[in-house]
Image (spheres, grey):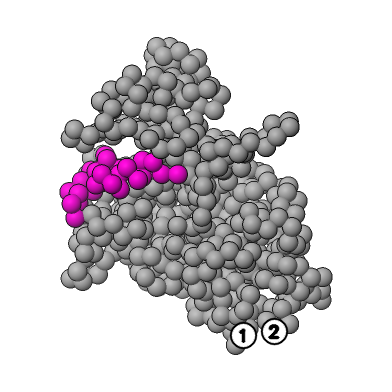
Amino acid sequence: MYQKGSSIALRIDKQRLEIRFLKKIYAVEDHCIGCRLCEVHCVTQHSKSRELVRAHRKEVITPSRVRVSEHGPISFAVQCRHCSEPACVYSCLSGAMSKDPISGLVIHDRERCIGCWTCVMVCPVGAVIPDITTSKVVAKCDLCADIEMPACVQNCPNRALLFQEVPP
Amino acid sequence: MNFKYVIIGGSAGGIGAIESIRDIDKAGSIAVISDETIPQYSKPMISEYIGEGAKLEEIIFRPLRFWEEHSVNIFSDKKVAKVDVSAKTVMLENGESMGFEKLLIATGGKPIIPKIDGAERKGVFTFVNLADAQLLLGRLQNVKEVVVVGGGLIGVSLAEALLKLRKKVTIVELKDRILNLILDIEGASMVADAVEHAGVKIITGRSVTRIAGRILSETQVGGVVLDDGTKMSCDIVVLTIGVTPRIEVIDPRKIKVNRGVVVDRFMATSAQDIYACGDVAETFDFVNNDSRLLPLWPLAYVGGRIAGSNMAGDKVGYPGGTQMCSLNYFGIPVISIGVVNPPKDSGYEVLAKLNPESRTYRKIILQNDVIVGMILVGGIVNAGVILDLMKNRVPVGEFKENLLSEEFGLIHLAEPLRLEMLRRN
């Protein structure tokens, strides 16, 4: 592909430079029953109140950034891979998508997004979702950067989503 | 002045090159020469600048501090007169010259100006860069009627912007439909319906033969005359036929030029240490397996990254691009990639599903079970999964029947590929 690269994230402490692999979410097909709780909790986590019932009943919510696919007996959840060579960042017309050099996260800035859907056109796993509540921006996984464990992983009843440094 | 890297052009290609050079070489000196004042704005967003009243800082692609952050010597508002290949020097119009070790030509494109009688009148505009947009915006205040010549991507996006400013807009398109290069008859008519419903008049199969003057003020635009004799009044005319490479600074005896600058898969030109990318270059098309002009922002950026890596000493091949557009005009999402109008009886297989009620349309074009093109109107989710299958020439025979489903995605792929994608880094 474009360039060699790996998902290394740098953590800079006061005293030392720690190099470690970026933790990512991995789906385990055999454990997924397609219950879509990950979607529900993703929406909740990205809502104003972060309360499940309140968010879904009373608030304007953004689409889930994790998507469960089902086909015959197979199901699994897909979300942004935070690629080392991110096609969405390389294609973004407005500069709204960027790859954070420190955390390794692919970050989407809603304020700068113009909803041209170019990232939807190029994401190889289909993880950038047009937000039709506004029709002007996309939504994508941010690994719930402000909580320890992403909400979809935390709330999966079957351990069908893992949050770890290396693939299962 | 001598620099390790000299880049002509500070738009998508130039910025891509700088970002990849700095991944590899933190210290090598970089100079960027641009004839624009603030080159790092987003060219596709100039219609937002017109229609949404966006300020300059809202259409900026990289922050104003970008040059400083990347230790780049930026020479803005400067024009290049010529590139001296043997002396490895770039001469500016103001007499200055710059020596380089590696040069990137990322000069982009300029508007195609059709030969139309009366095109010199005041009120005739082009629309490819910020300066064009600023000139146009400056004239729009007292304007009621606008004729947009050319119904391609730029023409339609400009029409949408002008409509937001409550102008009466007419698009005149030479071919039988708007967006004819990126859509087929069905797709184009769905978009045309939305464009017309919003209030834009579309005239197809006609060309503008004359731009007429205004009564009592012959030097000002007063209307246009079409090739069938139809006369239409208007206050301004915008020419949006397309772009052509800006190759004036290049000596074609020293650097090979076809329709654009010829580059190899490393974005290198025929001249040692000189690279080119973006709208000025003919780059690799992975669908057609040839090199051609593909004046598209995302491809310019990626081409720039590849050029930059190679200029900085890595050996990185360009995976290639192809015609690929995503539009969201008048609320209809449309994605078009690759071959979308295959010639009849030529061995292409076409899968298509039109749903007039939900205003969705899906068309997939295959050749020997490999996807070579697609049009999606309405439902565009997972478009990138299909693009990835195209790029990697994955045979799709086993799951072909699923391609027309709006639910099509990774789940339909064979297990090894599916797992690879799910665990992608």
Crowding at mark 1 (Cα within 10 Å: few <14, some 14-19, many 20+): some
Q: Is residue B227 left or right of residue B145?
A: left
Residue A139 showing in the rendered view:
no
Which amino acid, mark 1? Answer: Lys
Quarter residue A145 falls in? top right
Can residue B42 be found in the magenta stretch? no
What residue is shown with label 2?
A: B86
Crowding at mark 2 (Cα within 10 Å: few <14, some 14-19, many 20+): few
Where is B241 relative to B145, above or below? below
Question: Which sits in the foreground, B419 or B100?
Answer: B419
What residue is shown with label 1?
A: B254
Q: Residue at x 45, y 57 (%)?
A: A1
Q: Residue at x 36, y 40 (%)?
A: B422
Q: Residue at x 73, y 75 (%)?
A: B90
Asked which secondary structure carries label 2, the reply is loop
Residue B242, percent from left and from top: 49, 66
Question: Which sits in the foreground, A26 or B164?
Answer: A26
Q: Earlier in the sequence, mark 2 or mark 1?
A: 2
| C-beta proximity under 8 Å, tags 2 and 1 | yes
Q: Which residues are magenta?
A: B397-425
